[in-house]
Image (cartoon, grey):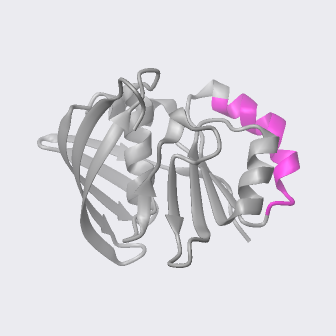
Amino acid sequence: MAQNATIYKVELSVSDMDRHYYETHKLTVAKHPSETDERLMVRIVAFALNAHENLEMTKGISTDDEPDIWQKSLDGALDVWVALGLPSEKVLRQSCSKAGRVIVYPYGGRTADVWWDKIKGSTTRFENLQVINFSEQDTSALAKLASRAMRLQVNIQDGAVMVSLGDHIVNITPHQWKSAA
C-alpha cells in the first residue's frame, strides 16, 4: 500500500446478470494521497464490472508498471489488466503485450473525449484491448458515495450499472469505445 494512503473498507456485492456472476467481495482499498474520490469509486466499479475470484486491486497509482486491477492465472500469467484514466499509446502497447485482455476505463468528460480522438487510430492493432468510457456526470455522482467504510451493491444488467449505498443510487451507462476482438 502507498505511504500515507487512506484505507477504505468496502463490502462489494456484485450481481452481474450479464455474466451470471453473484458474489460479495470484502476489499481493503488504499487511496493514494493524490487520488480523488471520483477515481477511487471508478476503480471500485471497474472491479465490479470484471469481478472474478482471482481479480485483485494492485498498488495502482503508486506503481508505474502495474495496472489498477489485475487477474492472474494460477501459473502467474496476467489474464486481465484493468487500467483507469488516459494512458499513453506506449503504455497501452506494453499492457497489451503483457496481458491476455486489457480493459481501459477513461473518465473525465471532455478530457477523455480528446484523449480518445487522439489515440483511437493507434489502438486498432490491439485485438485484446477494450475501452469503456464513463461520463463525467456518472463519475461525479459516484464520487459523492465515497466513504471510509462502504457496503456497496452493484447490479449489472444489459450493460447498465446500478450502484447503491444505503438509500443512495447511482445509475451508470458505460460507453464502449472499443471492443476486444
Q: What residue appears at the point 51 percent right and 46 percent down from the top-left corner?
A: 68
Q: Position of residue 124 (x, y in %)?
A: 84, 57
Q: Position of residue 17 (x, y in %)?
A: 35, 72
Q: What residue appears at the point 87 percent right and 60 percent down from the top-left corner?
A: 125
**Location of residue 176 with respect to 35 vertically, above or below:** below
Pick the front one: 123 or 92: 92
Pick the front one: 181 or 70: 70
Q: Position of residue 134 (x, y in %)?
A: 52, 41
Q: What residue appears at the point 82 percent right and 52 percent down from the top-left corner?
A: 123
Magenta stretch in the rendered image:
112-126
Q: Position of residue 138 (x, y in %)?
A: 42, 36
Q: Is residue 119 magenta?
A: yes
Quadrant, the N terminus:
top left
Q: Tell whether 97 sits left or right of 179.
A: right
Res. 160 in view: no
Q: What residue appears at the point 72 percent right and 66 percent down from the top-left corner?
A: 128
Q: Main secondary structure of the magenta part?
A: helix
Q: Tell whether 61 sits left or right of 87.
A: left
Res. 102 in view: yes
Quadrant, the C terminus:
bottom right
Q: Tell whether 37 sits left or right of 176.
A: left
Q: Quadrant of residue 30?
A: top left
